[in-house]
Amino acid sequence: MFPTIFAISLKGLGEKTKRASSFLMMSPVGGAVGPVLMGYVADNSTMSLSFIIPFISFCVVLFYSWYADVERS
């Protein structure tokens, strides 16, 4: 997911690309939060249901990429 977000976010920023890149590199927290949320869901229901967490994350990236593509067109 991150390469998609990174590439779309930096497209067309011109001289602001370096600053935006540094913010993007400091901000990924999905690797820290996602497993905790999956563990919480798995502990309170089933392991199969806990896979809804990465599914939701991928859906967010998908919709963001569609939105960003429409906005830039």
Image (tube, grey):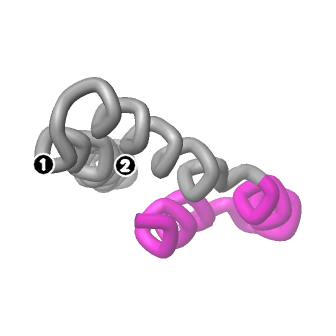
Q: Is residue 15 magenta?
A: yes
Element under disc 1: helix
**What numbered label is drawn on residue 17?**
none
Residue at 29%, 25% (x, y): give it.
44
| Callout 2 touching callout 1 (CB < 8 Å) | no
Q: Position of residue 4 (x, y in %)?
A: 42, 69
How far apart marks 2 and 1 lie (CA) works out to: 31 Å
Q: Earlier in the sequence, mark 2 or mark 1?
A: 1
Q: Does residue 22 sit above or below 60 in this rendering?
A: below
Residue occupying the point 38% across, 52% down: 72
- The magenta span reads 1-26
Which residue sits furthest front? 43
- Tell how many labels: 2
Residue under pointer 1:
48
Name which residue lies at 61% across and 64% down: 10
Q: Predominant secondary structure in magenta?
A: helix
Q: Badge 2 is on which residue?
A: 68
The quarter of the rendered structure image containing the C terminus is bottom left
> Please, what secondary structure does the residue beneath circle 2 have?
helix
Q: Position of residue 16 (x, y in %)?
A: 81, 59
Kind of residue at disc 1:
Ser
Viewer-nearest residue: 46 or 36: 46
